[in-house]
Image (cartoon, rainbow, N blue to C red):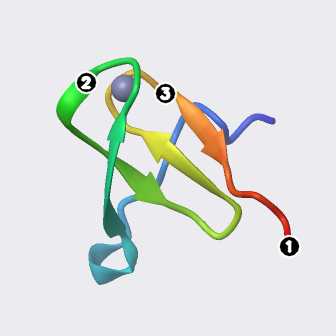
Amino acid sequence: MSESKYFKVEGENLVRTKKSCKECGDGYFMAEHKDRYTCGHCGYTEFKKKK
Ligand SMILES: [Zn+2]
């Protein structure tokens, strides 16, 4: 929970996706994490679907 508002920028480990943030609109791309995508601008988080 406590990490949800932050994401670490770890050099090349940060993967930018082509998903844009629903809240901020086009131009604000979400960062990919192992189980979720997050927007660094507003903190919006979208969880990946489990298979
Ligand atoms: Zn956003």
Q: Quadrant of the C terminus?
A: bottom right
Q: Considering the numbered disc 3 on the image, is that residue within a helix, a strand or a loop?
A: loop
Q: Quadrant of the N terminus?
A: top right
Q: Which residue has dot 2 on it?
A: 25
Q: At 18% across and 32% down in the image, what residue appears?
A: 26
- In front: 6, or 22? 22
Q: Please determine whether, in this image, residue 18 is positioned above or below residue 23.
A: below
Would you say the beta carbon of the disc 1 residue lies within 8 angstroms of ligand 1?
no
Q: Whole-Å distance between the Cαs marked 2 and 3?
A: 13 Å
**Label of residue 51 in the image:** 1
Q: Whole-Å distance between the Cαs marked 1 and 2?
A: 27 Å
**Label of residue 43 in the image:** 3
N-terminal of the pair, mark 1 or mark 2, is 2
Q: At 49% across and 49% down in the image, what residue appears?
A: 7
Q: At 67% across and 42% down in the image, what residue appears?
A: 3
Q: Please determine whether, in this image, residue 9 is positioned above or below residue 14.
A: above
Would you say the beta carbon of the disc 3 residue lies within 8 angstroms of ligand 1?
yes
Q: Amino acid at mark 3?
A: Gly
33 on left or right of 42? right
Quadrant of ligand 1: it is top left
